[in-house]
Amino acid sequence: MSLGIQSLGVCYTTYTKSVNSR
């Protein structure tokens, strides 16, 4: 479960960076 949450955090961070770049 912890691994899944960590993966989600990475995905969320990447998404936030993408939005910020826009």
Image (tube, rainbow, N blue to C red):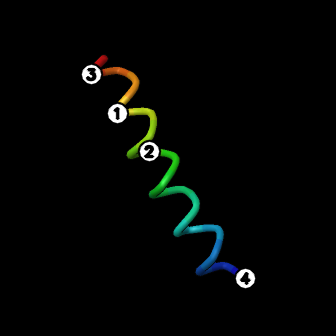
Q: Which mark is residue 17?
A: 1
Along the line of sight, which residue is nearer the eye, 5 or 15? 15
Q: Which mark is residue 8?
A: none
Whether 19 is drawn above or below 2: the answer is above
Q: Secondary structure at mark 3?
A: helix
Q: Residues within 10 Å of mark 2 (few under 14, many from 20)?
A: few
Label 2 vs 3, first from the N-terminus: 2
The reply to whether dot 3 and dot 1 touch (C-beta < 8 Å) is yes
C-alpha span from label 1 to label 4 = 25 Å
Q: Position of residue 10 (x, y in %)?
A: 45, 58
Residue position for label 4: 1
Residue that appears at 34% across and 32% down = 18
Q: Secondary structure at mark 4?
A: loop
C-alpha span from label 3 to label 4 = 30 Å
Q: Secondary structure at mark 2?
A: helix
- Split into 4 quadrants, where in the image is the N terminus? bottom right
The reply to whether dot 1 and dot 4 touch (C-beta < 8 Å) is no
Tell me the amino acid under the disc marked 4.
Answer: Met
Please give left or right for residue 4 compared with residue 17 in the image: right
Whether 16 is drawn above or below 6: the answer is above
- Split into 4 quadrants, where in the image is the C terminus? top left
Tell me the amino acid under the disc marked 1.
Answer: Lys
Residue that appears at 44% across and 45% down = 13
The reply to whether dot 2 and dot 1 touch (C-beta < 8 Å) is yes
